[in-house]
Amino acid sequence: MPAPKKQRFLFGDDSDAAGRASNESPASQSESDRKSIGPSEQKQPFTLADLKGKTVYVVDAPSLIYQVFHAIGEMTSPQGQPVNAVYGFTRDVMAMLEGGDADFLLCAFDAPGPTFRHELYAEYKADRAAMPDDLRPQMPLIRRVLDHLRVPALELPGFEADDLLATVAEVCQQTGAKCLLLSGDKDCRQLIDDSTFVFNVRKQQIYDAKALQADWGIAPEQVVDFQALVGDKIDNVPGVPLIGPKIAGELLREFGDLESVLANVDKIKGAKRKENLTNYKQQALLSRDLVRLDRHAPIEIDWEGAQIADFDYAAALKTFVELGFHGFAEKVRQLSPEIGPAPETETTAVETKEGRRELLDALRSQEEFAFALLPLDPVDRFAPPLGIAFCWEEGRASYVPLSEADCPADKFLQAVCGIESATMIGHNLKAAWLSFSALGVAAPKSAFDT
């Protein structure tokens, strides 16, 4: 199923955003119908009846955080703290705010401590590795970003994030809202129905009952029984030995549900399979209890706060600058009339040997500095640059023309990239490194891509 069409330009309508708007759904709105989120749009008093006909996005935060943490390489803030997960999570949440048809957005987290599933089975998730050291300090930063964006965070002791997704989905089903679950956890497939779908924000794809049928050959109401038979090694859900996805699908298509499978063991082919279904009957029933999500978790949902509208521009800007997220910071400046765009920058051309020497000394004294290349050929990424600009303080920049006769690009760029005491900040660094590599210049040890 195609992704929902972009309705809002939370951070303004630029060419990149317009390009992403090409994924249209049958119910997509015309260009003139699009709404823009900004200071003029205020949240309205909310009642549950207001959910009817609306679209709710609910994020499985642990799932998304781990995805971006492993997908994005090492990234540090100007202070040296790891921020790759914060960056990736912020990027995806902003994409949800500006790129979809969401009227409400919520993020669900796992609460610390055991859950009701551990009371059922002490070995539940017993083999899960501890949170990576580089990820742990990023969790409070992610919660801070959500607070600035005014996206409510759901968390309930004794329950998992998936249970909170299930609870939100149940409310949506009861009130006539459409619910999109942003999760990579296959447990959420049991929640799929005519109004609830799993959404992959990165691929911009909706996963529905038809997609489930193509993958597992079963209906959404059979997912819990399917997982009870197969088990889950990652969560240490035991299942039934020798029953894999293929066999589980066949059994459910033939008998309908787990009770019927267990009641008709004598009709099932394979002596060992029959033996295991008989001997591990209680284990299968336990597994079903472990994988079934609780659709009625006793949590108070801040629906009024979940309405997509204004956010705390000043706080978001401060945090984005602190973390080195300069692209996000500029988007906030563009959106907020109170903050406004960054001040004009006075650029000084550095065209003498002495000037370049002083510039390099100044760069070495910085903890970080931004740079931008003036390309010789915008199409040929391996072409040497015509010049390079630097900035490390607001409102002032230096530009160095590069020429074979006066300032060879390879020698000067090698000197710049050899500065190990500072982090080089740039946009689309992959393209910059391709240009550098064509000159035989190695990328710097510390860099940040906006």
Image: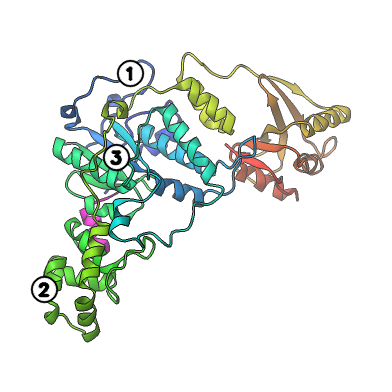
Earlier in the chain: of badge 1 and badge 2, it is 1
Earlier in the chain: of badge 3 and badge 2, it is 3
Q: Is residue 200 left or right of residue 211?
A: right
Earlier in the chain: of badge 3 and badge 1, it is 3
The quarter of the picture where residue 24 lies is top left
As measured in the structure, the alpha-carbon distance from the residue carrying label 3 to the one carrying label 2 is 43 Å
- Mark 1: which secondary structure? loop
Do residues under tags 3 and 2 come within 8 Å of each other at their CB atoms?
no
- Tell me the residue that label 2 is attached to: 263
Q: Nearer the viewer, mark 3 or mark 1?
A: 1
Do residues under tags 1 and 2 come within 8 Å of each other at their CB atoms?
no
- Disc 1: CA contacts within 10 A as few (<14), some (14-19) or many (>=20): few
Q: Residue at x 27, y 74 (%)?
A: 243
In the rendering, at what x and y percent does residue 122 appear? 34, 60
As measured in the structure, the alpha-carbon distance from the residue carrying label 1 to the one carrying label 2 is 58 Å
Q: Quadrant of the C terminus?
A: top right
Question: Residue lying furthest bottom in this view?
Answer: 271
- Tell me the residue that label 3 is attached to: 4
Q: Is residue 164 left or right of residue 313?
A: left
Magenta stretch holds residue 381: no
- Tell me the residue that label 1 is attached to: 41
Q: Nearer the viewer, residue 416 or 315?
A: 315
